[in-house]
Every structure is written in C-alpha cells, then in structure tokens.
Image: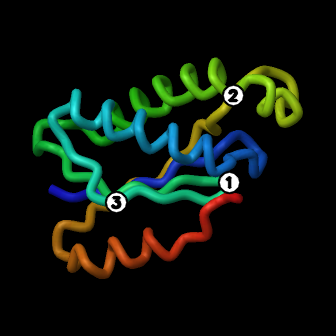
Amino acid sequence: MCQGCGAYPEWRPCITQPMLSRLEAIARATTEKWEGEVLEFNGEPDHLHLLLELTPRTAPSAFVNNLKTVTSRLIRKEFGEHLQQYYWRKPVFWSRSYCIITVGGAPLSVLKQYIEQQEAPE
C-alpha cells in the first residue's frame, strides 16, 4: 500500500537544505525499521512530502507519530542553534498536524513527479 504523507514544522518556515538532507536520511532509516520504503522525498521550508510504501499491518498514524518524534529529537539536537530563532514558547519542531493520503490507485510516476517539483529550501 502506498501512502502520501505531509509533515509541517511548528508555525515557521525553518527547514534548510542541510536539514532537508538529514530529514531524508532519518526518514529512510526509520521507514526501513518499520519494514517500509520511502519511494520519494522532498520538502519546502515549511513542510515535507513523502511517498511511502508501508506494510498493510502498519498503522499510518503510529508510523507518522514515530517518524515525527525521531526526526524532531535528532533535528533539534543537530540544528539547535539554527532552530533557536524560530522557537516561540517551547523548542518544538513539528506541529501536531499531518496529512496522510492513501494513493494505492494513482500512478506512481505522477505522484513522484508532484513531489519532485516541490520547491526545496535553499
């Protein structure tokens, strides 16, 4: 089953290109631990797009919550100085919201093209 997933930083466009590269590495490693695969990954300064293949027994909400927890912890640790300027009250990286869309019937080439065309941060 393929899923489209979006994750959003807490109220701010703070993702840089080095952060995006690190987020991709973390996402790929985490997805592999869940016996899934990242088919496509891209992001903009204020959100990420992932095209994932997850097993039917994987609860998408549990996976996304785990992915956000892992990425938040590592990104805040590795890019804390950069992120400090974006914190409002607490050092929170992701908002609590996300979007998951099941895309089992859509052509993968169209979905990959959409994700590839997102404007990456500088």
Q: Residue 10 in the image: x percent, y percent?
A: 71, 40
Q: Which is nearer the N-term, disc 3 or disc 2?
A: 3
Estimate the x, y position of residue 122 in percent, counting from the top left: 71, 59
Q: As shown in the figure, which amino acid type bears the numbered disc 1?
A: Asp
Residue in the picture at 28% in, 50% down = 38
Where residue 107 appears, as percent x and y from the top left, is 21, 79
The residue that disc 2 covers is: 79
Mark 1 vs mark 3, CA separation in Å: 18 Å
Q: Please, is residue 90 above or below residue 97 in the view?
A: above
Q: Give coordinates of residue 6: x percent, y percent.
A: 48, 54
Left or right of residue 54, residue 115 in this image: right
Foreground mark, 1 or 3, reads: 3
Outermost residue, left side: 56
Q: How is the image coloured?
A: rainbow
Depth check, mark 2 against mark 1: the one in front is 2
**Could you tell me which secondary element the residue under label 2 belongs to?**
loop
Does residue 4 appear in the picture of this structure? no
Q: Residue at x 22, y 34 (%)?
A: 32
Residue 48 visible in the current orientation:
yes
Give the structural element (helix, strand or loop) at label 3.
Answer: strand
| Mark earlier in primary sequence (1, 3) | 3
* Label placed on residue 40: 3
Residue 46's disc is 1
| Placement of 38 over or under 85, stated as above or below | below
